Image (tube, helix red, strand yellow):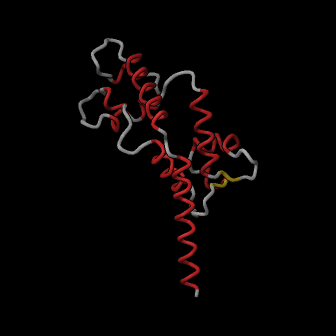
Amino acid sequence: MRRTLHGWGALSLAICLAAGAGALAQTPAEQQSYQQRMRLLFERLDRNNDQRLQRQEVQGQPYLERHFERLDRRQRGYLGPEDLSPSSASRGERAVRFFQQADRNADGVIDRREAEAFAWLRRHFGQADRNGDGRVDPAELQGLAERRRASSPNPSP
């Protein structure tokens, strides 16, 4: 009997995660908007219009400075427009993976203790926790991401 109940618990968790994945999925319009913002960012940073972002051209862009090597997938020493395009994993898929990592006890929500391991989530926990219950569910996390994207004055990754 215990195995059966444990099996149902795992099935329930899988269903919750699948529902969360749907809530965090990115629509084609959102993908197009993101690609447009990346193209505009690239054009703005490419000061000499050579279709390459050298390390000095990304100065002042913390994300690009920190992740330059990872984004330079072909290890050429510069970033091309394709390096700033979304990877095969959509933003929604990455959000689901992030949520699963942060939800250490796999209960379907992230509490403050779990959020402490992630600087960004720790800083924005209060904004994400819309209902004030001290926990962030997938819909609340997605809502925060959408609000931040909508209020962002500049395109950024």
Q: Residue furthest bottom?
A: 1
Q: Residue furthest top?
A: 48
Query: Relative to 38, is 145 on the left or the right?
Result: right
| Nearest to the observer: residue 29 or residue 104 | 29
* Image location of residue 56, percent across then percent down: 36, 20
* Image location of residue 119, percent across then percent down: 57, 43
Quarter containing the N terminus: bottom right
Is 32 drawn above or below residue 123 in the view shown?
above
Q: Residue furthest front?
A: 28
Residue at coordinates 29% horizontally, 19% vertically from top-left? Answer: 51
- Residue 9, by quadrant, is bottom right
Residue at coordinates 61% horizontally, 63% vertically from top-left? Answer: 107
Is 21 drawn above or below residue 84 in the view shown?
below
* Image location of residue 15, percent across then percent down: 54, 63
Query: Relative to 143, is 63 on the left or the right?
Result: left
Residue at coordinates 53% horizontally, 46% vertically from top-left? Answer: 24
| Nearest to the observer: residue 65 or residue 96 | 96
Is 101 drawn above or below residue 118 in the view shown?
below
Q: How many marks?
A: 0
Residue at coordinates 25% horizontally, 35% vertically from top-left? Answer: 75
* Image location of residue 79, percent across then percent down: 31, 27
